[in-house]
Image (cartoon, coloured by chain):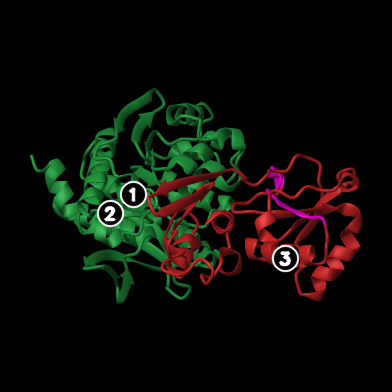
Chain colours: A red, B green
């Protein structure tokens, strides 16, 4: 479900609904909530917060406001509690959806926003992770480099920040094309 | 004194400040040894090598463990707010860090009160938060790559993750993005943009373009941007003008990369080992 992030669009009926956003303490909580809600079939999107509630490395979940009660209940069942639920009254930021790919002989590099992952296409070994600026990037690199693409831990599972999110997009793209 | 602020990718690494030494592929601070493998440790290692060549003392570092949950960074922000003014720095470099605009603003408010403001260099998370907070012009040098430059050029993006597609598109030329970043006050006094070609620029435009030696495979190697930041910071600290230091650092970093005979699978320490040779080649005469 993570790999469809940024591409999924709301159904026509949902588009006309009043939208709200769930604000969480940190990005890790957002990722957990996204996984839970998508698994239950809700049409939600992970987006950038409006400026008035932005503090730094932020994500929010956009949802049909009318579903608030049910959504809060499902999240509380897995002990996730948003710190704010607010109606959307401005345009939210879309996450990056443009990828750059570059070949170096048998190696392929994919970049999503500021994050790059490079794989040996013959062996499927992740040979390098570069870019980024959040503190989990060196940690993610340490955990992923020299591991096979299918066996490496994924940023969505061990990362916390928007850089990790961008790396996950690059990883998913690499899996798709490699 | 050259000061360096950054993170170590270990959850239990304590908040620590002190002079850093380099021993083989480890940096030593207090009783802690950290493997030099991209991120702030790679930046520090490159700075230490450069300072040694320039006959300058080792840097004073403020480090904390953080694997992305921001806990370590939060404590270091608070520590810096209170303690950063205790030392007289000529140059301060800020690196991998969890962006938090309100805590960041308290740190730069403290720096602004210093009797003599140090030369401020920012890369990675600290560069992001400086732009997020509208404080980019407070800094003297940013060292973005192409993706990060697009972020600086996008006046609406609060993080590179939200850079709008029409700006991120590769048809956009680096000089145009530099111009746009300055138009919206989202760049430091100088930019050193790293990539296939490196660019040194200020608000008046491009000052230098460095494309030799050509080592395309440096881009996928994690840490090559970190070494560039370390080298340029040490050169600036040694008294070189920022624009000159940026151009020289670019050549030194490319040469070190070239000497390592890299592939996309090369690891950064193999390049760091070549920095002394590259320094000698570029600055020896």
Other residues around mark 1 within 10 Å, as few (<14) / some (14–19) / many (≥20): many
- Labels 1 and 2 touching (C-beta < 8 A): yes
Other residues around mark 2 within 10 Å, as few (<14) / some (14–19) / many (≥20): some
Residue B97 x %, y %: 47, 57
Magenta stretch? A43-52
Sequence order check, earlier mark of 1 and 2 = 1
Mark 3–mark 1 distance (CA, rounded to whole Å): 36 Å
Residue ranking furthest to the top:
B204
Q: Nearer the viewer, residue B180 or B74?
A: B180
Label drawn at residue B69: none
Q: Classify A60 as above or below B139.
A: below
Q: Secondary structure at mark 2?
A: loop
Of badges 3 and 1, nearer the viewer stands 1
Label drawn at residue B218: 1
Residue identifier under label 3: A35
Asked which quadrant contains residue B7, the reply is: bottom left
Q: Nearer the viewer, residue A136 or A129?
A: A129
* Discs 3 and 1 lie in a common subunit: no
């Amino acid at each position: 479900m993570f790999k469809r992030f940024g591409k999924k669009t709301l159904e026509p009926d949902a588009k006309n609904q009043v939208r709200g956003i769930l604000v969480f303490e940190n990005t890790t909580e957002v990722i957990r909530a996204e996984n839970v809600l998508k698994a239950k079939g809700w049409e939600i999107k992970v987006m950038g917060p409006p400026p008035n509630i932005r503090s730094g490395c932020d994500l929010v979940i956009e949802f049909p406001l009318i579903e608030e009660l049910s959504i809060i209940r499902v999240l509380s069942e897995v002990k996730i509690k948003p710190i704010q639920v607010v109606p959307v009254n401005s345009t939210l930021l879309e996450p990056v959806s443009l990828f750059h790919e570059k070949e170096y002989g048998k190696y392929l590099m994919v970049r999503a926003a500021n994050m790059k992952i490079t794989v040996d296409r013959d062996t499927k070994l992740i040979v390098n992770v570069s870019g980024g600026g959040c503190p989990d990037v060196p940690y993610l690199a340490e955990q992923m480099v020299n591991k096979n693409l299918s066996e490496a831990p994924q940023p969505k599972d061990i990362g916390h920040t928007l850089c990790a999110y961008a790396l996950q997009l690059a990883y998913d793209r690499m899996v798709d094309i490699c | 004194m050259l000061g360096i602020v950054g993170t170590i990718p270990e959850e239990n690494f304590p908040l620590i400040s002190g002079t850093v030494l380099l021993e083989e592929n480890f940096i030593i601070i207090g009783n802690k040894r950290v493997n030099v493998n991209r991120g702030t440790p790679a930046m520090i290692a490159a700075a230490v090598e450069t300072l040694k060549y320039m006959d300058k003392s080792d840097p004073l570092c403020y480090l904390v463990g953080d694997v992305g949950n921001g806990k370590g960074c939060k404590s270091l922000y608070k520590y810096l707010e209170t303690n950063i003014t205790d030392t007289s720095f000529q140059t301060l470099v800020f690196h991998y860090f969890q962006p938090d605009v309100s805590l960041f603003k308290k740190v730069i408010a403290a720096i602004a009160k210093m009797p003599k403001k140090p030369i401020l260099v920012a890369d990675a998370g600290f560069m992001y938060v400086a732009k997020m907070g509208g404080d980019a012009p407070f800094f003297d040098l940013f060292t973005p790559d192409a993706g990060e430059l697009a972020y600086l050029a996008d006046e609406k993006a609060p993080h590179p993750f939200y850079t709008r597609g029409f700006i991120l598109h590769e048809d956009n030329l680096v000089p145009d993005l530099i111009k746009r970043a300055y138009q919206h006050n989202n760049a430091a006094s100088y930019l050193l943009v790293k990539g296939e070609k490196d660019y040194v620029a200020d608000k008046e435009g491009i000052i230098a373009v460095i494309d030799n030696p050509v080592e395309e495979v440096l881009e996928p190697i994690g840490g090559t941007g970190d070494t560039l930041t370390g080298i340029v910071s040490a050169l600036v600290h040694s008294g070189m003008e920022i624009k000159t230091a940026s151009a020289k650092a670019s050549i030194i970093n490319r040469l070190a990369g070239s000497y390592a005979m890299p592939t996309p699978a090369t690891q950064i320490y193999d390049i760091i080992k070549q920095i002394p040779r590259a320094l000698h080649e570029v600055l020896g005469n």
